[in-house]
Image: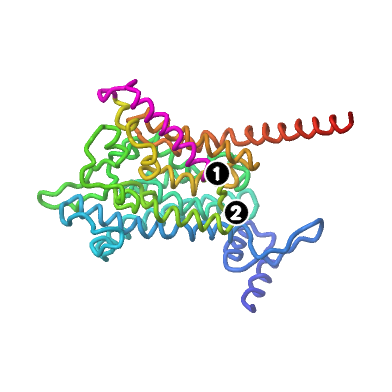
């Protein structure tokens, strides 16, 4: 308590200093602010934006840790140094060797993401003279989880600067942005460096430089294999569900994503309406494509056949649709705000995600593009939902008046 009061006194003595927003950010990260509301109606509560963000981070930590183990496992499996894992709880997966590879490859991604992103946030806070906002706490954790494990750090740094400046700060900062910053960063990487984000380029950490070993292992993700009508021998549905497959760092384990979803719904931070409607939309589009294949309207020679013929429910355990539904689509700033709007918003995300996945074999993953598209239309959806409610109430008033 004494340290908090001393820091608060120091802040008051230097309240006119240009660098004070940076100090305030560190102060409120450790302590609750001393300032309270004085006018108008307000509610006393123990939570604030920072602690809400920290709750989302807690839901992401299991995916991060699992991603580290999986990075090491895929590294050794690609080189033929180990056989397939003996299940999610198998000893061949949860080894220190696997974890060490994961730490070496994944931890720098986290450090660069937070270091560069927070530096930009602090810089804008000092220049514009406003408080440092906590919005990047979640974005900084999401970014390392949605990129390939071997992406060059300088590419990630450039993308983070772009995402924070163009995706958020130009709109006025946290709470004002219309696009999800983490997905804006991924979109920049996809369009600026497509060969690194295509789904069949270095999604598995390569071997170390040595005689007879490659510098990097180029292995397809499951979506890439489906898109090329390739064989998926050796990978079963349980491997897809538990996450023992190549892919982005945090999106492979559907089991842990479901656990995170339940945690966010229980803490009332994630919208169950958006999550459920996104999955319904994805299953609906998958069923439509299955119907097209069953009707014989498209043959095996078509480049779209591979992903069209995937059983509709499998779309939920391959790729990033589940991760996007839980951690991206539910962003309270960029998502729809009305209850009916959330159903429409989520359904269209899932529907469009599978459509893009099938019709874009060169990059067989559409969830981030679908979410960004619906981020733009979310205000329009809410507008028409509200206007519809107003018209219905006006009709009821006229009927009663008559």
Q: Is residue 100 visible?
A: no
Dot 1: within a 10 Å radius of its alpha carbon, few (fewer than 14), some, or many (20 or more) residues?
many
What residue does disc 1 label?
274
Depth order, front residue of 295/271: 295
Residue 64 marker: none
Alpha carbon of mark 2 to alpha carbon of mark 1: how far? 25 Å
Q: Is residue 281 left or right of residue 27?
A: left
Q: Secondary structure at mark 1?
A: helix
Is residue 383 magenta-colored? no
- Residue 26 picture location, percent across and down: 57, 64
> Residue 22: where, in percent of width, then height?
58, 59
Residue drawn at 84 percent across, 30 percent down: 399
* Stretch in magenta: 276-302
- Which residue position holds label 2? 133
Q: Residue at x 25, y 47 (%)?
A: 235
User: Left or right: 36 with respect to 212?
Assistant: right
Q: In the image shown, does 330 or 287 lie closer to the viewer?
A: 287
Give above or below for 72 relative to 324. below
Question: Viewer-proximal residue, 48 or 246?
Answer: 246
Q: Badge 2: how crowded within 10 Å, few (<14), some, or many (20+)? A: some
Membership of 294 in magenta stretch: yes
Identified at 32% across, 38% down, the residue is 223
Residue at point 49%, 36% (across, down): 281
Q: Position of residue 163 (x, y in %)?
A: 49, 42
Quadrant of the rendering where the C terminus is positioned: top right
* Above or below, comparing residue 161 to residue 284 in the picture: below
Disc 2 is placed on an element classified as loop
Pick whichever of labels 2 and 1 is earlier in the sequence: 2
Q: Residue furthest left?
A: 211
| Image x and y of residue 58, in percent | 49, 61
Q: Main structural element of the magenta stretch: helix, strand or loop? A: helix
């Amino acid at each position: 308590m004494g340290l908090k009061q001393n820091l608060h006194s120091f802040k008051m003595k230097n309240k006119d200093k240009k660098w004070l927003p940076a100090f305030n950010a560190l102060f409120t990260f450790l302590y609750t602010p001393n300032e309270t509301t004085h006018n108008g109606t307000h509610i006393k509560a123990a939570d604030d934006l920072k602690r809400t963000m920290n709750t989302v981070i807690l839901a992401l930590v299991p995916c991060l840790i699992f991603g580290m183990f999986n990075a090491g496992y895929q590294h050794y499996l690609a080189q033929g140094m180990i056989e397939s894992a003996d299940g999610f709880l198998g000893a061949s997966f949860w080894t220190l060797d696997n974890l060490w590879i994961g730490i070496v490859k994944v931890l720098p991604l986290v450090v660069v993401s937070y270091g560069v992103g927070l530096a930009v946030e602090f810089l804008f806070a000092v220049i514009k003279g406003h408080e440092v906002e906590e919005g990047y706490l979640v974005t900084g954790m999401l970014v390392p989880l949605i990129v390939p494990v071997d992406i060059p750090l300088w590419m990630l740094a450039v993308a983070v600067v772009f995402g924070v400046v163009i995706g958020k700060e130009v709109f006025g900062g946290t709470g004002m942005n219309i696009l999800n910053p983490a997905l804006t960063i991924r979109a920049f990487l996809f369009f600026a460096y497509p060969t690194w984000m295509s789904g069949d380029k270095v999604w598995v950490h390569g071997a170390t430089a040595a005689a007879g070993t490659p510098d990097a292992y180029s292995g397809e993700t499951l979506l890439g294999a489906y898109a090329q009508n390739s064989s998926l021998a050796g990978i079963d549905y349980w491997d897809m569900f538990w996450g023992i497959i190549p892919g982005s760092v945090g999106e492979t384990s559907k089991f842990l994503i479901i656990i995170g979803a339940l945690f966010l719904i229980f803490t009332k931070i994630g919208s169950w309406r958006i999550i459920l409607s996104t999955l319904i939309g994805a299953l609906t589009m998958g069923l439509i494509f299955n119907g097209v294949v069953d009707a014989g309207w498209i043959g095996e020679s078509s480049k779209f056949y591979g992903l069209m013929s995937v059983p509709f429910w499998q779309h939920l355990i391959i790729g990033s649709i589940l991760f996007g539904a839980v951690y991206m689509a539910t962003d309270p700033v960029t998502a729809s705000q009305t209850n009916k709007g959330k159903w429409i918003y989520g359904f269209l995300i899932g529907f469009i995600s599978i459509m893009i996945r099938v019709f874009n074999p060169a990059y067989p993953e559409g969830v981030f593009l679908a979410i960004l598209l619906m981020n733009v239309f979310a205000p329009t959806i809410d507008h028409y939902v509200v206007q519809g409610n107003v018209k219905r109430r006006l009709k009821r008033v006229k009927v009663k008046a008559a």
